């Protein structure tokens, strides 16, 4: 019986932090502020616009200017989202290994479809991706389990033949709620608030090159 390995996108398959940070810094320059180093903003990247505006401007979602700033951030990011973005080292080989073993893989991301689909194609992932579920595909986004359950259904897999890999605590929470085992991608962005060791993932890996043994074990279980 085959297995479906579902991946988060930003911070798990693709290193998108530099382009996300550049869009966040554009919001600072519009306000006459100096730009921040990309590494300062990197940890906020898995939380999307909400996280990056928090990191760049200390702006919360209840700020009166938040929605307008969020829309400008998304516009700036869409205009230059594939400048430095690339797959993490080892991802291409990992996905090839999954395919060789007769498994399938897909993507479940909170990134909106109009942003995710072009990047998935540009990075050469579209051909073998069994399913792509984006932040606006279902009525709820992660950490709600619905996107993961929808991905399993669309790809034709029962939940007990699926697993989820992500670099944010919300990914692990979504997997748990969906009844799927999980792998924490500790090489990703991971966020500033919850150490990866506290997420209670089934496995924790520090490089995409080190992930195959964890996938193989979960598939066997």
Image (tube, helix red, strand yellow):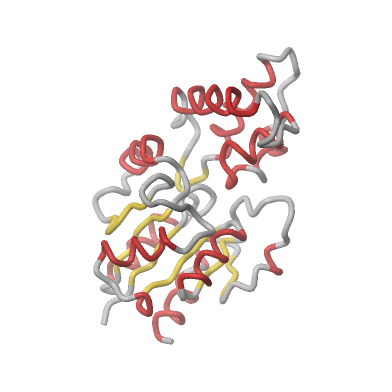
Image position, residue 160 (x, y; %): 38, 80
Using the rendered view, name the quadrant where residue 94 is placed.
Answer: bottom left
The residue located at (54%, 59%) in the rendering is 143
- Give 101 or 12, whichever is nearer the viewer: 12
Image position, residue 189 (x, y; %): 62, 50
The residue located at (64%, 73%) in the rendering is 200
For the C terminus, give its image quadrant. Answer: bottom left
Q: How many marks?
A: 0
Relative to 143, 44 lies left or right: right
The residue located at (38%, 66%) in the rendering is 149
Image position, residue 145 (x, y; %): 46, 64
Using the rendered view, name the quadrant where residue 73 is placed.
Answer: top right
Q: Is residue 138 above or below residue 4?
A: above
The residue located at (74%, 54%) in the rendering is 193
Q: Is residue 173 above or below residue 202?
A: above
- Give 118 or 158, whichever is nearer the viewer: 158
Relative to 58, 166 lies left or right: left
For the N terminus, give its image quadrant. Answer: bottom left
Using the rendered view, name the quadrant where residue 92 is placed.
Answer: bottom left
Image position, residue 214 (x, y; %): 49, 75
Relative to 63, 151 lies left or right: left
**Residue found at the very far bottom of the displayed protein:** 221
């Amino acid at each position: 019986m085959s297995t479906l390995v579902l991946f988060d996108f930003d911070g798990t398959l693709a290193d998108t932090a530099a382009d996300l940070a550049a869009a966040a810094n554009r919001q600072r320059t519009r306000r006459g502020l100096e730009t921040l180093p990309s590494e300062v903003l990197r940890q906020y990247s898995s939380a999307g616009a909400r996280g990056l505006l928090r990191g760049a401007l200390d702006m919360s979602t209840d700020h009166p200017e938040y929605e307008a700033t969020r829309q400008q951030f998304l516009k700036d990011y869409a205009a230059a989202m594939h400048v430095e973005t690339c797959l993490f080292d080892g991802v291409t080989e990992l996905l090839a290994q999954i395919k060789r073993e007769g498994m399938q893989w897909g993507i479940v991301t909170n990134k909106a479809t109009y942003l995710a689909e072009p990047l998935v194609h540009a990075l050469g992932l579209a051909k073998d991706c069994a399913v792509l579920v984006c932040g606006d595909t279902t009525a709820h986004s992660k950490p709600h389990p619905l996107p993961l359950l929808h991905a399993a259904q669309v790809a034709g897999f029962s939940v007990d033949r699926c697993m989820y890999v992500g670099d944010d605590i919300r990914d692990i929470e979504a997997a748990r709620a969906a009844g799927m085992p999980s792998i924490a991608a500790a090489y990703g962005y991971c966020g500033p608030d919850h150490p990866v060791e506290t997420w209670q993932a089934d496995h924790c890996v520090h490089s995409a090159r080190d992930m195959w043994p964890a996938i193989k074990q979960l598939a066997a279980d």
